[in-house]
Each structure stands twice: as C-alpha cells, then as structure tokens.
C-alpha cells in the first residue's frame, strides 16, 4: 500500500486519484486499485509471476486541473518454501538387494533456482536411508508382513524453509 500525494498551489483542494493505465497481474486482472489516496495491490504480489509493474496515475483537483504520472513498482523477491516432493519410483521388490536404489527425490519450489536437502521423518519401520536425494533400501522387507509403508520426507531449501510430505512405498 502506498500513499499518493500531489503538490497543488491551492493548498486545501481535494485531489481525486485514478489509474488511467493499470498494470496487469499474470492472471490478467488489474494489479492495483486506488482507495482515497491509497494505491493498493488487488492481490498478493508474487515476484516469480511478475517482478515489476508499470502504471499511470492521474491526479485531478477541484478545478479540474490534472496531472498524470507514470510509476514503476518493483516487487521484492522473498523465499517461498518448497511446495511438493516427488519420488521417481515408489515400488521396491521384496527380493531387492540391500543398498538398492529405491528412487530419487526432487522438490517443487516456486523459487526456480533454489536447491534442496532432504531428510527422513517417520519411516514406519521401512529400512531405508537417504544419501543426498537418493533413497536406498538398508534392510530386508517382506510383502506378506507389510505391503506398503508411509514415509515422511522433508525438503529444506537454501533459506531453511521446510516442507514435509508423506510418500507411500509399495513392496
């Protein structure tokens, strides 16, 4: 939110502000509105969608005199946490060898250039280990005892934002 002001030689003149050329958000809707003398965003601005906006504001005094100014508004980038965790394979054979690669983890993150580290939460008794983003089998498994396991995996981005997801591993 920004407060608009205009220098007018008539000190007590009421000024009416209007947007004559509005910037559009990535969804095609107008990015800003004016309420009184306040320029307000119509939604949360997202750097990844649009890093800056250009708009024109017209100020008109009581006598009908007006002036237009063009503004450029930059959006600061803030870290967003990862939004999903994917596993390339969620099935492991009962006869799989110890140390066999089950699958590779990856994270979806609104911050395109972010990298992630992974750690295991609850593995529900499934004998697994992580090495980087590779998920390995570390012990024997038996389909007749348990046909699937729910494993909680965390992805942490460079800024420390943590996202957890329960993944199902089928035997």
Image (cartoon, rainbow, N blue to C red):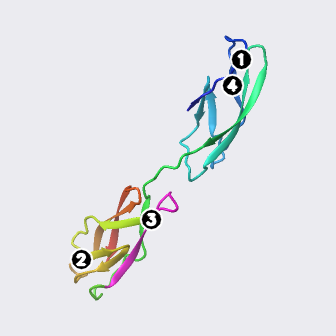
Q: How many marks?
A: 4
Give coordinates of residue 112: x percent, y percent.
52, 61
Instruction: Give the mark toward the camera: 4 or 2.
Output: 4
- The disc placed on residue 8 is 1
Magenta stretch: give its range.
100-114
Tell me what residue is drawn at x 51 percent, y 62 percent.
Answer: 113
Which of the two labelled residues, at mark 4 and mark 2, occupies the earlier sequence position?
4
1 vs 3, front mark: 1
Nearest to N terminus: mark 2 or mark 1: 1
Reading the image, the residue beneath label 4 is 17
Q: Is residue 84 above or below residue 70?
A: below
Residue 16 against residue 79 in the figure, above or below: above
**Mark 3 or mark 2: whose residue is earlier in sequence:** 3
Residue for point 56% across, 44% down = 45
- Quadrant in the rendering for residue 105: bottom left
* Marks 4 and 1, the one that precedes in the sequence: 1
Q: Crowdedness of circle 4 by 10 Å Cα count: few (<14), some, many (20+)? A: many
- Report which residue position mark 2 lands on: 127
Residue at image position (56%, 53%) is 48
Q: Earlier in the sequence, mark 1 or mark 3?
A: 1
Q: Earlier in the sequence, mark 3 or mark 4?
A: 4
**Quadrant (top left/top right/bottom left/bottom right) for the C terminus:** bottom left
Whole-Å distance between the Cαs marked 2 and 1? 74 Å
Residue that badge 3 annotates = 115
Choose top left, top right, bottom left or bottom right for residue 99. Answer: bottom left
In three-dimensional space, the C-alpha distance between marks 4 and 1, rounded to whole angstroms, equals 13 Å
Instruction: Give the number of the mark in front: 3 or 4.
Output: 3
Find out whether residue 104 is within the magenta segment. yes
Q: Residue at x 47, y 62 (%)?
A: 114
Q: CA distance from mark 1 to mark 3?
A: 52 Å
């Amino acid at each position: 939110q920004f407060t608009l002001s205009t220098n007018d030689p008539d000190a007590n003149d009421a000024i009416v502000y209007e947007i004559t050329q509005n910037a559009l958000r990535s969804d095609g809707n107008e990015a800003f509105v004016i309420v009184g003398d306040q320029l307000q965003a119509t939604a949360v601005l997202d750097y990844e969608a649009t890093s800056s906006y250009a708009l024109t504001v017209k100020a008109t005094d009581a006598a009908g005199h007006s002036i237009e100014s063009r503004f450029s508004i930059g959006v600061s980038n803030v870290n967003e946490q990862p939004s999903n965790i994917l596993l390339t394979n969620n099935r492991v054979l009962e006869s799989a060898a110890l140390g066999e690669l089950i699958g590779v983890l990856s994270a979806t993150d609104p911050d395109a250039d972010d990298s992630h580290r992974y750690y295991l939460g609850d593995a529900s008794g499934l004998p697994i280990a992580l090495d980087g983003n590779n998920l390995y089998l570390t012990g024997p498994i038996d389909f007749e005892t348990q046909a699937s396991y729910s494993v909680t995996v965390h992805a942490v981005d460079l800024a420390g934002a943590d996202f957890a997801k329960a993944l199902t591993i089928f035997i």
